Structures are given as C-alpha cells and as structure tokens.
Amino acid sequence: MKVAIFTDTYAPEINGVALTTERLVKYFKDNDIEYMVLAPNVGEKCEDSNIIRCKSMKFILYPECRLSVPIYPYIVKAMGDFKPDIIHVMTPINIGLCGIKYAKEYNIPLVSHYHTNFGQYLNYYNFKLIEDLSWKYFRWFHGKCDRNYCPSQSSYELLENHGIGNFEVVNNGIDIDVFSPKYRDINFR
C-alpha cells in the first residue's frame, strides 16, 4: 500500500497535527508501508526523501506554523511519480484542498483527520460571526472524504452536533517513552 499524506503542519513544528503525522510516518516505516508526506517548507533541510516540502508562508492565526502555498501541477507530478493507493488529508486548508482535488480527479480513496476546533479559535480571536460559516465549510470538506477520523469521543460529538458524519474515533495515543510513570518526579510539581 502507498499512502500520501497532505498536511499544513509537520516536523519540526510541534503541535497535535504534526505529532500525529509523525506517529503515522513512524508506523509506516516500522511496517514497511510506502508513504509520501506533502508539507510546508519550514526552511530546514529534511533528510527523509519521502517528505516533499511545498512553498509556504507565515500563518497569521498560528504564527509558529507555516501555511502551505501549494502549486497544484507540482503536486500532480509528485503524486504521479508516487502513485498513491490512498490519500490521507490531515488539515482542512490549503494543502488539504489539494489532496481532495487530486483524490477526486484520479479516483483515489480519501480519508481525513479532524484535529482542531476552529470554532473555538474563531471565538478566541473574536471572529464569532464566521463560526457558522466555518462549520458549513467543514461539512463540505469532510463530506468529500470516504472516511474521517477524530481523536476523541468529545470531538466526535462536537462534529456530530454540527451535522458532520462519517467519523470514527481513532485515539492519537500517548508516547509512553516520553510520558511514562517512570519519569514521575514529585519535586517537579
């Protein structure tokens, strides 16, 4: 199987989407699954030839991240060379839209992941007026996918309450090498 992952955030960025994507890549490596990740260029050299970096710019709502500025013909060439069996979209914006477009154009199964409660962000940044519009967009986006995944029962219920279906809860997991009881230190509290 060949999996193409489309994500607007990836290592060395540190956030839930990037870490989940890194765990997927580790799983693919450990299980000899061919993969390609399309992610924004963050200005650092990447040793993994399966990571394709796209042009990017600063993301004003999330300054520590870069936002992909994908060039679709470049993506078509990369995907044509790779020939994925499935496309996994990790983010619902720029590069995620390219993943949907490519999957639909080339009739490739498409799955997506829901990670971020954008409605909560919109409220925080005083954009409450467009929250309903954002949910309409997410219904459209996730409606294009053959299957959608979310990290928790509470996110599943949030999506269901906003009329978004076809989801399955897939726990992102905890890295037990990092968050192990053996590292517990009462003095750290």
Image (tube, rainbow, N blue to C red):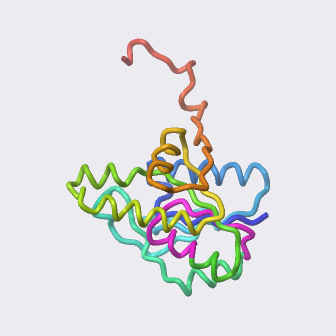
> Is 115 in front, or is 68?
115
List x then y, in percent, for residue 188.
38, 18
Drawn side of residue 167 relative to residue 86, left or right: left
List x then y, in percent, for residue 138.
45, 62
Drawn side of residue 156 relative to residue 34, left or right: left
Quarter of the rendering containing residue 108: bottom right
Quarter of the rendering containing residue 62: bottom left
Q: Residue at the far bottom: name it.
A: 73
Q: What stretch is highlighted in magenta?
A: 83-100
Q: Does the magenta stretch include residue 89?
A: yes
Q: Residue at the far left: name it.
A: 126
Q: How many numbered dots are placed on residues in this image?
A: 0
List x then y, in percent, for residue 65.
38, 59
Look at 47% across and 68% down and name the residue there.
Answer: 40
In this rendering, is residue 22 above or below 172? below
Q: Does the magenta stretch include residue 112?
A: no
Drawn side of residue 185 relative to residue 129, left or right: right
In this rendering, is residue 83 above or below 181? below
List x then y, in percent, for residue 128.
24, 56
Drawn side of residue 132 relative to residue 53, left or right: left
- Which quadrant is home to the N terminus? bottom right
